[in-house]
Amino acid sequence: MSIRLSDIAKHYGRAGRALEPVNLEVAEGELVGLLGPSGSGKTTLLRIIAGLERPDRDPAGRILFGDRDVTDVHVRDRRIGFVFQHYALFRHMTVFDNVAFGLTVLPRRERPSSGEIRARVYRLLEMVQLERFAERYPAQLSGGQQQRVSLARALALRPEVLLLDEPFGALDAKVRQELRRWLRQLHDELGFTSLFVTHDQEEALELSDRVAVMSHGRIEQIDTPDALYHAPANRFVFEFLGDVNHLEGEVRDGVLTCGAARLRTSLPEGRERLLLRPHEVRLAETPSPEAHLPATVTAVSPVGAEVRVELAADWMAEPWLATLRHADYERLGLTRGQRLFAVPRRWHRFTADGRPQPAAPARAAAA
Amino acid sequence: MSQRAARLALPLPARTQRVLPGFGLSLGISLTFVSLVLLLPMTGLVGQLKGLSLAEYWAIVSDSRVVASYTVTIGAAAVAALANAAFGLLMAWVLVRYDFPGKRLLDALMDLPFALPTAVAGITLATLYAGNGWVGALLEPLGLQVAYTWVGIALAMAFTSIPFVVRTVQPVLEDLPPEVDEAAMTLGAGDATGFRRVLLPYLWPALVTGTGLAFVRSLGEFGAIIFIAGNAPFETEITSLMIFVKLQEYDYAGASAIASVVLAVSLALLLAINVWQGRFIRKLHGGRG
Amino acid sequence: MQRIGDAPAVRRGLIAVALLLAGLFLLLPLVAIFAQAFAEGVAVFWTNVSDDYTLAAIGLTLFVTVLTIPICLVFGVALAWLVTRFDFPGRRLLQTLIDIPFAVSPVVAGLVYLLLYGRNGWIGGWLDAHDIQLMFAWPGILMVTIFVTSPFVARELIPLMQAQGSREEEAAVTLGASGWTLFRRVTLPNIRWALLYGVILTNARAVGEFGAVSVVSGAIRGETMTLPLHLEQLYQDYNTVGAFASAALLALLALFTLAAKAGLEWRTARQEVSP
Amino acid sequence: MIRHPRLARPLLAIALGAGLAAPAMAAERELLNSSYDIARELFAAINPEFIAHWQETQGEEIAIQQSHGGSSAQARSILQGLRADVVTFNQVTDVQVLADDGLVAEDWQQALPNNASPYYSTTAFLVRKGNPKGIDGWEDLDDEGVEIVFPNPKTSGNGRYTYLAAWGFAEHQFDGDEEQIQAFMRDFLGNVVVFDTGGRGATTSFIERGIGDVLISFESEVNNIRGEYGSDDYEVIVPPVSILAEFPVAVVEENAERNGNQELARAYLEYLYAEETQRLLAGFNYRVHDEAVVEEFAEQFPETELLKVEEVFGGWDAAMETHFASGGLLDQLQRR
């Protein structure tokens, strides 16, 4: 079932706006992540869709599930599945009773027979691989297991919309990875429409069909992970997704100067702020004629496909991060405290109001 | 007692590593106090009981009038405790879940029965609920007599134990995360179902504890009841009065015998509450403990 | 945010029922006390309150209360520290033992003290021979008052200290704090409101105790009559206004206690919001 | 206002912050009179007279302390160490308990005139205005629909007198036919709507709460109540046959000796027989022995046949044993 939001806004008393009027469309069967820093309004948005919060009356926004207008429908009648960050299992009920709960509170004429409930619950438990734990109490399960119970519970009523609020936030990295994969599988298998909230960009990008990046109560951009990374709509999205190095200085006579750092560019005169991804920074033992960016290695982490190098210098507002191939790392023989020079391969610029300007390859790299 | 001496005095499990100071001091103070103030006087009771043979003891505590007083006391205490369970639950709910003008006042008012001396409560309730009192005058025409009947006893008991349920349920309700409500609602539970099947079980231990404490307190209450009970034999005589009567007859042994029954029942109930609570909590928090 | 029972009709209904019941069962008795006390005007009320015997009863009541509080405080803190910070055999038993005063009818409490310390008791006989009088004098009243109020402080502290755990204290020990410093600097700030609440409850009960005190008081007018006993005697003397004047004093004290407690809770809540 | 030097002591102790200060000894001699519940006003009137009398005759300033409570509870307190010098009770048995324990002289009833009872009373009825139920004597009290209020005989001496008076009447009426007596008593007790623990509680129930048709208490008490609450609303009925209620007094020798108050205590009790005191007592509606005073107040006290516990029941010990002990006749009559 598709979800359509138009002009959904929310403010809390005098505390201010939690949500600017938001428009969002999620296609049937789509898995969309809501990504943003804390306070960006992503959880509020999710809770409004669930019916746990009421949107402002002015502007009069609408929420549509398919063709059904659910704006004024109570949460208990929206027929959504909701998964809470801290699972919110009923701790006085066994795993079985937790999963069965939604079925047992159905109005009598809609309620399946107890045999059918039993069968359905076991099918769900099987799906989440917890059939052996049916008679356990939540406190006797690990965090990952509890979250799986919570998911099974949310799915028991066969909702067409599944909403997840930071579902993996409280779990450790390894379990999180596993559950993520498993959720994606489940989603593809059952074909419901999912919306989940996360502050973890990796999670959002890996799991979602599309990601809505939010900040200050607004959706900054909603797009596929690939498009978000490669064609950010604005500086916020660019900076929020992935690591960014900053180079800010005054351009005069085709040279950008920032303390001891110099970079030859073809940019117009004036103050400029350039942004570089870590993989867009090359390291060299000597300065090139185009770039003179001296720095000291402060940390080296050779774990993973690439080597991450942290750089510091007086002219940097914040330390830089560069990634290089293992071969280059070995060639340079990097050690902590070593002094060397950073060479930009390319950089990105944004206008004062955050709109992107064409990214340009640095001259040095082109040379 | 020094810590070392304490270690020697008690066979302690080896795993107990006492990092924190003050074991000896606090043990010393506690044991001294408990022995001198609580246990030593109880020996007086035991001393009196020793003067009785088992048959005599049984004859005193199973006297039909005394037995009738147990029935009255326990019945009224049960009614009072149950009424308090409902009243306390409602008050705790309203105080925690809703905002309304006068809420702070209502909250403060809940402790009144503990702050108000029971004798004051007794004469006030008797004055209010007597046939010519403010409330009694309204109830009497309806054929409902409160003062000097069994209802009056239950009323006095209920009044003096109001705070128990409210104050045990309130913090639990406050600490209940909103997700519990929300989870129930997203699963389609209505108000009544959600409350009964989801919220109530969370409040259950506190509710039972509070009700149990209210019951125990009601068993022993004397000051407030004596003014409003009719003290008619077999009908409105409470057990505390039977003890009082025995005292008037210089029958210390008899008084002690009846007192020992009340004491045993009360202590057993308190212990049961403690143990039950421990079990319940263990179940909900995993196999620890 | 929506929660169970938030529908306006449900909310209004429950609030109305709660206010009605509280008004009927809690507020009305309170109003009745003052109505009776001032039934014959302020002057009569004042005459009753400023009567020598009433003043003496107030004096004795306050005297006993002032002595009771520190004793119960020391015991309560020591016991709470003991059962929440250490594990030892008999811990649960000790915790149940402190409930004895809750389980014992106050009249019986008075009786057991009388049986022990009275002239015919095994300690009382010795005391009598040495011309030391505890029962039927203020020490006896103090003793039974301590008995009935002893659980309050501990009962307030134990759940709190259990919930808080001993991490902070352990951290303080690793930083070299010890003994009194540890308690004063680390523990006390965490428990002070519960401690105060315990003191307030102790105070309320100490002021109002009737059953136990009546057994050991001896009822000597102007000497061993506490305010609740005095009230009862006035009531017995058909001096309804006088009895309710004393009742009003006790009720005022109760209201003051409630206000102090509400104030404390408000402060605590505010502290939690803005640390 | 009652002058009392030791009243302010606890207040003072707090003011000084000397929480543990031992009780300071008062400068003057003190006499402690342990008395029954409803005698507060009475002794509040007598004591200043005696203090003045003692000052006049002996030139010594003394103070008198009063302790009031149920007569039995008072006796129990003395047994357990309350240092009363004299007792002024409304129950012979309660003094006897002290005598049995050796605190009071064995021959205490001979120590003072009239069985050591300076004044006496009987049991009478207080009914509502116009006597709507037409109650004139004990024979009207077992009628169906009559609601009676009197204190519990188990906890109150007052209540015991009422019980014995009713029994004495019945024995008189039915010529000792045990079956009829018991039937009468059962109906009589069955008509009781409230058994308060003490006389004053019963009065409160009857007057303030408006419960019952008749309150049974001491003649002195019902007259006082009528005086207090208005002669327009209540009527006093003194039945033609009732019981003699003695108000025994005695010196608690052991305590008086310890306190050095022996002759003071004796003088105090003797003073209760003095003409001016007897007049004062009669003013409180107690019947007295002093002939001059009896004459003076003759109108106030109707002629009544007063049964004696000794004669009808063979003494208090026997009465207690047969009627009031656990499992005794009272218990049996109240059994359903």
Image: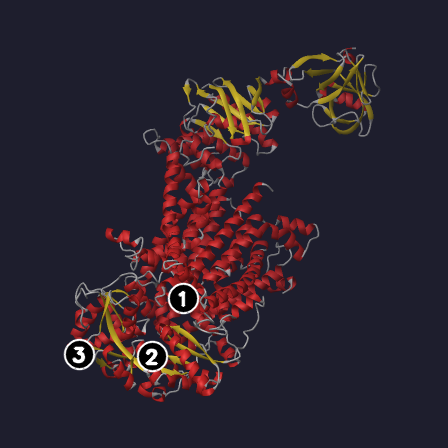
Residue named by callout 1: B260
Left or right side of A119 for D195: left
Chain hosting mark 2: D
Whether label 2 touches label 3, CB < 8 Å: no
Query: Is disc 3 placed on a helix, strand or loop?
Result: helix
Q: Amino acid at mark 3?
A: His
N-terminal label among 2 and 3: 3
Question: Along the line of sight, which residue is nearer the eye, A177 or C275?
Answer: C275
In percent of width and height, residue D270 lies at: 38, 86
Q: Is residue C63 above or below residue B125?
A: below
The three-letter code of the residue at mark 2 reads Leu
C167 and A240: which one is in front? Answer: A240
Q: CA distance from mark 2 to mark 3?
A: 34 Å
SS for dot 1 = helix
Where residue A50 sits in the image (x, y, percent)?
Answer: 46, 27
- Distance CA(mark 1)–CA(mark 3): 43 Å
Rounded to the nearest whole Å, what is the CA distance between mark 1 and mark 2? 47 Å
- Look at the picture and state if A169 lies above or below C118: above
Residue B78: image x %, image y %?
35, 54
Q: Position of residue A347 (x, y in %)?
A: 72, 16
Query: Badge 2 local density, few (<14 within 10 Å), some, or many (20+)?
Result: some
Q: Label 1 crowding class (10 Å Cα cut-off): few <14, some 14-19, many 20+?
A: some
In what quadrant of the picture does the C terminus of chain C appear?
Answer: top right
Please name whichever residue, A83 or C17, is drawn nearer the observer in this view of the structure: C17
Mark number displayed over residue D172: 3
Q: Tell me the residue that label 2 is attached to.
A: D280
Please tell me whether residue A129 is drawn above or below residue B281 in the rendered image.
above
